[in-house]
């Protein structure tokens, strides 16, 4: 039985006061929901402050990126130990914006993933095809290739602790959502691949989130699909009302 996991990716948005206010509103509006795991991933500079605000709350805290090395001359980067030190539990890895704008490869994501797992943080590894790749009929090949590369060398136990987020690039921040059938097809294929790369029981454990313009009005149908176990939410995670409505939709689902 996989527990639905909804995470908000705030990207490079909000300032300290608005970030704190949002977290306070969510602590209030999500009180009493215990059948859904929830996390927010604010800009790293606010992680420490928000960890203090969130103390005692069931809402988890995640970073949007990390570097794989433990310390040293890596100007501008943060280590897993630093994220843990300020109260982080999750880390998003290989988001399509990091891949497209900052040149992150599957090999780098794999390096980071191993460091994150070794540190005891929970990784959220993003994969997904571009519109061009989808239109060329390459979705399965691309997504399977990203999974193989990003997840290479993981043990069964490490794979069970890894969250995947299928995020078709053409649906991120565009208002275009994959239909529930389109998303479910890819999620089912990812699970089938995990079953061959690891084992059927490991594949059954893994949480696979969907991401790409998830909103209150499409969440229920997407999250109702058998292989969609949660959502990675960008734009709609920046407002308490819209993020709360998505979590409430998740809480209403019985799988
Ligand atoms: C994301 O950034 O991971 C995302 C899915 O964004 P949006 O919900 O805005 O499409």
Image (cartoon, grey):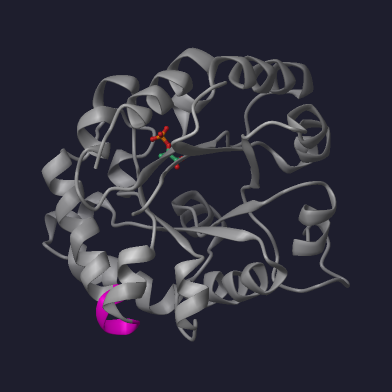
Examine the rendered structure and indicate whether residue 52 appears above or below residue 169: above
**Predominant SS of the magenta segment:** helix
Q: Residue at x 74, y 21 (%)?
A: 20
Quadrant containing the C terminus is top left
- Is residue 168 covered in magenta? no
Count of marks placed on residues: 0
In the image, 152 versus 1, the foreground residue is 1
Q: Is residue 248 visible?
A: yes
Examine the rendered structure and indicate whether residue 201 appears above or below residue 37: below
Range of the magenta residues?
Answer: 194-198
Q: Is residue 210 left or right of residue 185?
A: right
Q: Quadrant of residue 133?
A: bottom left
In the image, 176 versus 23, the foreground residue is 23
Residue 50 spot, x, y in % from top left: 76, 32
Q: In the image, ligand 1 is in what quadrant?
A: top left
Q: Residue at x 62, y 70 (%)?
A: 117
Q: Residue at x 28, y 57 (%)?
A: 129
- Is residue 196 covered in magenta? yes
Q: Is residue 133 visible?
A: no
Q: Is residue 16 left or right of residue 145?
A: right
Residue 65 spot, x, y in % from top left: 64, 54
Examine the rendered structure and indicate whether residue 20 appears above or below residue 130: above
Residue 101 spot, x, y in % from top left: 52, 53
Residue at the bottom extreme?
A: 153
Q: Is residue 60 left or right of residue 51?
A: left
């Amino acid at each position: 039985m996989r527990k639905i996991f909804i995470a908000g990716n705030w990207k490079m948005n909000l300032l300290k006061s608005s970030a704190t206010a949002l977290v306070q509103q969510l602590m209030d509006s999500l009180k009493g929901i215990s059948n859904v795991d929830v996390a927010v991933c604010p800009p790293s500079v606010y992680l420490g402050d928000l960890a203090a605000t969130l103390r005692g709350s069931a809402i988890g805290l995640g970073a949007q990126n990390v570097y794989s090395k433990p310390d040293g001359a890596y100007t501008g980067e943060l280590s897993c130990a630093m994220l843990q030190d300020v109260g982080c539990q999750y880390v998003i890895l290989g988001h399509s914006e990091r891949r497209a704008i900052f040149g992150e490869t599957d090999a780098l994501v794999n390096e980071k993933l191993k460091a994150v797992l070794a540190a005891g943080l929970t990784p959220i590894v993003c994969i997904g095809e571009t519109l061009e790749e989808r239109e060329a009929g390459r979705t399965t090949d691309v997504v399977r290739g990203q999974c193989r590369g990003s997840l290479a060398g993981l043990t069964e136990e490490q794979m069970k602790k890894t969250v995947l987020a299928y995020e078709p690039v053409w649906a991120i921040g565009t208002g275009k959502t994959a239909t529930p059938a389109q998303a479910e097809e890819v999620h089912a294929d990812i699970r089938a691949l995990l079953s061959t790369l690891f084992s059927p029981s490991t594949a059954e454990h893994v949480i696979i989130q969907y991401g790409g313009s998830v909103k209150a009005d499409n969440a229920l149908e997407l999250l109702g699909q058998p292989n969609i176990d949660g959502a990675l939410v960008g734009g709609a995670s920046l407002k308490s009302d819209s993020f709360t409505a998505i979590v409430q939709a998740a809480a209403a689902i019985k799988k």
